[in-house]
Image (cartoon, rainbow, N blue to C red):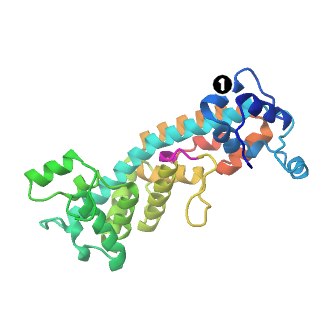
Amino acid sequence: MDKPFKTIEEQVELLEARGVATDDDTPEVLLREGYYSVVNGYKAPFIDKEKSESAKDDRYLPGTSFADIYALFMFDRELRMLFFKYFAIAEEALKTTSAYCFSEAHIGEKEPYLDASSYDTSPNQIGLLLSDFNTALGRNSHRKPKRKLYLEHYSKNHDEVPIWVLMKYLTLGQAFKFYCFQPESIRNEIAKAFSSLYANDHEKPIRISPRRLRLAYDHIKDFRNICAHDERFYCAKASPSRDIAVTDVVNDMQLVLSKNTYVELLAQYAAMLLKLSNSLGPDVLKKVLKEMKVESIYSAFSVNE
């Protein structure tokens, strides 16, 4: 077997043989968290590439300890938890504002979100989204929805389910498609609404274009899903070209969060970076920050007025 089972004692011995200093806490951490999750997941900045190529397996930079690797693991876990909280706030804003502008454009129409003519996209694309909507409403004979009391309440007690109610059920990915499939006029109104919200909080207003909002929406969606699936976050890359990093999505969040909420996020984020800088050596820290596109720790405090 290429990857035979190893006892905790054998895992500790393997780490030490490869140049990692262990301590009394290492066995418990390996048992609770797992070698694969901690070591395989976060070893990259600590690897000595030349020695590894020569040895044909992992070799670590001089001075590397298991505590260092675990510190990066814990930093990433806390980073995911932090951002997941604020992604939830951003998700609510994106869904609510999109639903509001759509509803304002379709006053007096009954469930216009189920009408393909309300959208500007191909029949195949909108067909899939409308199928998801009908599934949520319990009107798709081929798929059963997850039971949601608020949808059942509206279905039983009202003659329609408004889009702002349905939005609670939709994933952020489905809500993103809903935004992208809107006619240009409605996407403009949604972007204008966020520009107005931004102007209310900042001394220097900016114009948020529909395209810029779409990119922010897309990045927030992707990084939110990374958090939800408990994947590595600090070095994650999103977008088709895989060039969007943590710093990019931080900038995106400023467009959709209130200034006070954004400042809260930045303060906690910067504090975590400062804590990490006290746990890792400068060379390893430099690699980690480069993956995150953080030019310097203090740049994480930057807020537009």
Query: Where on the picture, by quarter, is residue 67?
Result: top right
Placement of 79 over or under 120, stated as above or below: above
* Local secondary structure at mark 1: helix
| Predominant SS along the magenta part | loop
* Number of residues whose C-alpha sits closer than 10 Å to that of mark 1, classed few (under 14), some (14–19) or many (20 or more): few
Q: Is 230 inside the magenta-drawn segment?
A: yes
Q: Is residue 257 left or right of residue 277?
A: left
| Magenta span of residues | 227-231
Pointer 1: what residue?
Answer: 28
- Depth order, front residue of 242/296: 242
Q: Is 182 inside the magenta-drawn segment?
A: no
| Residue 2 coordinates in the image, percent (x, y) | 74, 49
Residue kind at label 1, given as amino acid type: Glu
Query: Where on the picture, by quarter, is residue 69?
Result: top right
| Residue 123 coordinates in the image, percent (x, y) | 32, 79
Placement of 41 over or under 34, stated as above or below: below
| Residue 297 coordinates in the image, percent (x, y) | 66, 40
| Residue 164 coordinates in the image, percent (x, y) | 24, 54
- Depth order, front residue of 19/160: 19
Q: Is residue 251 left or right of residue 18?
A: left
Instruction: Report if residue 134 is visible in the image.
Output: yes
